[in-house]
Image (cartoon, rainbow, N blue to C red):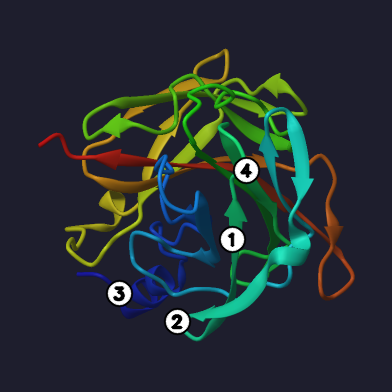
Amino acid sequence: MIRPLLVAALLALPAAADAHFQEIIPSTDIVAAGGDHSVRLDLAFTHPMERGPAMDMARPQRFGAVVDGKTHDLLATLTPRTQNGKTAFEARWQFRAPGDGIFFVEPAPYWEAAEGKWIIHYAKVGVDFAAGTGWDKLVGLPVEIEPLTRPYGLWTGNAFRGIVRKGGKPVAFAKIEVEWRNDGSLKAPADPFVTQVIKADRNGVFAYALPRAGWWGFAALVEADKPRPGPDGKPAPVELGGLMWVKAVDMK
């Protein structure tokens, strides 16, 4: 028989599936040669597999794109929007010439009261426009996933591989959380199915086979070297995340 106090203690624990993901989702990962050559990007801080709840996003510290080796500051292009009643952002980018674009965001630090820590998730996504090159370039984020698999043109079932880097150096045995951006067609049978958890090897390399079509987020999590003051002024830990989004498509 489970005692009531034990039940209360278990219910008070944070859910294992409560993984936070910084989304940066383009309207397409491959821009067609015809048309206006533009892409829309939606930014939100949420729980993608559970379709929420979303958290309020403050205006990001940085938002930009690396195209043809050049970094473009796109912070001024961000427009606030709402998602599940919370603040999120959107932007548009017009490709002027063929070339892959690596879009990235450095959000403002988010205070997670339930865990007593700050969260800063540096997220990025690759978009191809008639190039097929430049997809493996690093943005230079404090924590970042270097793709070893081209991050677009992926079939369902393909394995996505990458290297977790912190300060440019591989992170041995880094923890990576993986979630599918649920379109409402799937309900996880249990919490462990919501957030998949894998570890990199001693060289920081990881691999994951994409079992379903749609957007997949990979969040490599490390602790910052230094704490920062919490709302009470006392030092609090900082969770740094290097996130990358990739899309899988069914082979039909």
Q: Which tag, 2 or 1, sits closer to the chain's start?
A: 2
Above or below, 2 against 243 in this view is below
Q: Which tag, 2 or 4, sits closer to the chain's start?
A: 2
* Quadrant assignment for the C terminus: top left
Question: Residue at image x 27%, y 26%?
Answer: 158
Indicate the position of residue 130 as horizontal and vertical percent values.
47, 31
Q: Residues within 10 Å of mark 2 (few under 14, many from 20)?
A: few
Q: Secondary structure at mark 2?
A: loop
Q: Amino acid at mark 3?
A: Arg
Reading the image, the residue beneath label 1 is: 92
The answer, for residue 140, to whether it is visible in the render is no
Reading the image, the residue beneath label 3 is: 3
Reading the image, the residue beneath label 2 is: 84
Reading the image, the residue beneath label 4 is: 96
Asked whether 11 or 180 is in front, the reply is 180
Q: Secondary structure at mark 4?
A: loop
Q: Which tag, 2 or 3, sits closer to the chain's start?
A: 3
